[in-house]
Amino acid sequence: MKFVCIIPSRYASTRLPGKPLCDIAGKPMVQRVYEQAAKASKLTAVVVAVDNPKVYDTVVTFGGHAVMTREDHANGTDRLAEAVGHFPDADVIVNVQGDEPLIAPDVIDDLCRAFEAEPDLTMATVAAPLQEDEYDDPSAVKVVLNQKDEAMYFSRSLIP
């Protein structure tokens, strides 16, 4: 299967403008995310879907691949949906958020393996048990799963 990782990266973040270019130990965040994703062995390609020429230039400068998308997307999913058009031969699109500089490459590979194991699988989300210190953290997205481990509801607020 051909797995393409798209990293939606928004320069005009409402909570932290310029977030993709924020320095993390000498490298911009977008580079940290890209490099982690590129370590996943199952991916055919890694690309950053950007909304700003500064981010595009940064990605190209460190040797990464980027595609320009419109600035007016409401969220990363919309940005990713536009970028998917550049990869018509991809079997699976893997969405890695642009603010996940510590994402483990094996998590990406495990997700890819789920698609290889279940040919009828059309969508999947990686989830982990919520830690107590994340209960009131709006940046920690919470998910409710049913008995089949299917996502039923996502929230930034604590779910009763």
Image: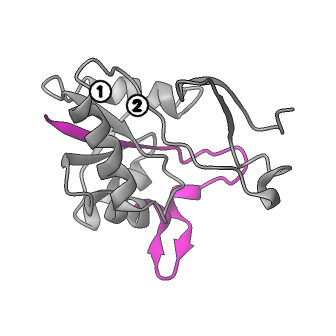
Q: Nearer the viewer, residue 101 or 12?
A: 101
Callout 2 amino acid? Leu
Position of residue 26 measured from the top left corner of the image (x, y, whole percent)? 47, 82
Callout 1 amino acid? Val
Position of residue 5 measured from the top left corner of the image (x, y, whole percent)? 30, 43
**Would residue 13 be seen by someone viewing this image from the given angle?**
yes
Tell me, yes or no, whether the highlighted magenta stretch contains residue 107. no
Please report the bounds of the magenta region as a residue range. Answer: 1-30
Q: Is residue 2 left or right of residue 123?
A: left
Quadrant in the picture for the C terminus: top right
Position of residue 47 measured from the top left corner of the image (x, y, whole percent)? 28, 46
**Would residue 5 be seen by someone viewing this image from the given angle?**
no
Residue 122 is drawn in which quadrant?
top left
Q: Secondary structure at mark 2?
A: helix
Q: Is residue 117 left or right of residue 54?
A: left
Q: Which residue is mark 2?
A: 80
How busy is the neighbourhood of tag 1: few (under 14 within 10 Å), some, or many (20 plus)? some
Residue lying at 32% horizontally and 30% vertically, measured from the top left: 83
Is 84 drawn above or below residue 58 in the view shown?
above
Tell me, yes or no, whether the highlighted magenta stretch contains residue 8. yes
Residue lying at 58% horizontally and 57% vertically, measured from the top left: 19
Residue 32 is drawn in which quadrant?
bottom left
Q: Is residue 21 left or right of residue 86?
A: right
Q: Which residue is mark 1?
A: 84
Label 1 and label 2: CA atoms lie apart by 6 Å
Is 11 drawn above or below residue 122 in the view shown?
below
Is 155 drawn above or below residue 56 in the view shown?
above
